[in-house]
Image (tube, rainbow, N blue to C red):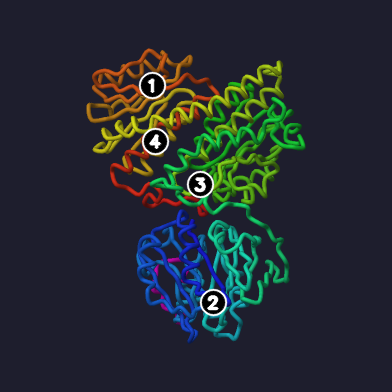
Amino acid sequence: MCGLIAVVCRQRNPVPLLLSGLRRVEYRGYDSAGMAILDPQDQLYVKRSVGNVGKLECLLADAPAASRVGIAHTRWATHGEATERNAHPQISRGLVAVVHNGIIENYLLLRRSLEARGYHFQSDTDTEVIAHGIHDQLTQGKSLCVAVQSICARLQGSYALAVLGTTDRNRVVVARRGSPLVVGVGHGEFYAASDVAAILPMTQTFFRLEDGDVAELSCDGAKVLDRDGRLVQRGLEHSDLDTSHVDKGGYRDFMLKEIFEQGRALRATLASRIDVGRIRLDAGGELDRVLQGIRHVHCVACGTSYHACAVAGYLIEAMAGIPATVELASEYRYRQPVVREDSLFVAMSQSGETADTLAALRFARGAGYRATLVVCNVADSSLVREADFALMTAVGPEIGVASTKSFTAQLMTIAQLAIVLARNRGCDPVPVREGEHIAELARTCVLVDLILELSPDIKRLAQEFVEYEHTLFLGRGAMYPVAMEGALKLKEISYIHADAYAAGALKHGPLALVDAHMPVVALAPRNPLLDKLRSNLQEVRARHGRLYIFADSDAGLASGVGATVVKMPHTTALSAPIVYTVPLQLLAYHVAVLRGTNVDQPRNLAKSVTVE
């Protein structure tokens, strides 16, 4: 979850570089932040603060400009609450500083051993055992790099580390297992970071550390040792990512920018797989050949991506006639799933580093599935590298913690997958039918642009939600997971408690919550379930619930006493999940802004969930 960066310079002051990098990985956590550099006397200069990077920056006015090496961290709290003493870097006896992303599962055992050796712990973190463990190794005459190797061999769990020691001037040692870490290569400078975006202002050339790697960075070069201690070289890569993609571009927040980028992102995702009027999922056709024999689809994900999986289940079964199972990755990985014959495993993740989803994929690879497929936004992520096949969403970086454009691009991608599965099953034997599906997906991009024009109207509507503390969302069919996504967006950025229900389940318990103080948001596309939904809405009105309905303009629903109807364009089964998602994003955004919350950095959350 946390974000880290390390810098080794020949001539430049590392502090501005470290701060710049921290801001670009702050989406990974912002409970606290800290920095350690070596001053000209080879003493550690350490500053830590509760809160975001801006608060840390205010403490750095007296940082020694003559320093050439440093590490920094922005934290999402796991072990220990968000306090200054639990912030990183964690220090051992003023000689070793460590920043860490991950969870050390055997830290209590290590802590007891180190306490028995005379080490006193100042924090509640698991990271402090790493700092003291490295110091203990240094007292035995080992170099910093060897000390890090030694302690890493004793760690159980996941980690990405950057270590600074007073005994090894102008060097940083980094290591990883289970958590991502890249090393940037500059001119007489080296950088390490949790995300390549953090180092883009300094360099676009980098390499990735593999699991078990330990690297020593200095101005003279980078020495990489694999898990067996062998000197290795990792292949250099070049990032073409434009740094403007991680700027707000004139918008108030990243989230608002990313909501308004959805039309472009959807067009790019659709176009990436269209070939002469047909959908081609991969250039070589290998995935298409595998899909021809698929008789079951098993979709697994977490959070917003789980809602995309749920929509996938509806579309795949309805269009292709193939049974689809959908479940949370955090549940899947701890049970004994029965894998059906000729089953396709599908994992979805924006970052491609979600710990539970990655663990689920690793289990699935040996469980007897015909193939594993991931839908992801990061081409060089762990999920993409480890799956048999990958379908990429062409949305660019998503910085806001609340996912927006990645979700709708996932919906576009699974719609394309459903079309191909239907084609392979002979459900749409006439090529014209596939062309109609593609045309409908293209029309969806236009409809999204039209919905974005409703932002001022939805902002006015949001004013009615500011004083609410609870909200119910209702949907039927594929609109149910869209309602779940709407509820998630509202709760995670406005802190209003929100729950979503299949509208038909309302009378089985949730109706007890409905009164004049309970707003109910309903999704009403014109489809075969519309009349059923109308009946559910009458149940709410009979109990004086306040209805907010996003309804097809031909649905026959109108605003009145106790009900506000927002007119929506006509959609189909393919387009409705995407189109009806957008106004819910706007509603959550405007409510959050009116309530004064930080929409890009909601409390207690982080963008990339790299721990269990």
Q: Position of residue 202 (x, y in %)?
A: 57, 64
Task: State the separation of the CA atoms marked 1 and 2.
Answer: 62 Å
Query: Looking at the rendered structure, which numbered label has been put on residue 131?
Result: none
Q: How dense is the environment of label 1, judged by Cα within 10 Å: few (below 14), some, or many (20 and up)? A: many
Q: Give the structural element (helix, strand or loop) at label 2.
A: helix
**Front residue of 255 and 612:** 255
| Residue to which mark 3 is pinned | 398
Query: Looking at the rendered structure, which numbered label has been put on residue 567?
Result: 1
Q: How dense is the environment of label 2, judged by Cα within 10 Å: few (below 14), some, or many (20 and up)? A: many
Q: Give the structural element (helix, strand or loop) at label 3.
A: loop
Q: Position of residue 246 (x, y in %)?
A: 50, 52
Q: Position of residue 58 (x, y in %)?
A: 35, 68
| Residue to which mark 4 is pinned | 586
**Front residue of 230 and 270:** 270
Q: Magenta segment range?
A: 116-128
Give amino acid for label 4: Leu
Give amino acid for label 2: Ile
Earlier sequence position, callout 1 versus callout 3: 3
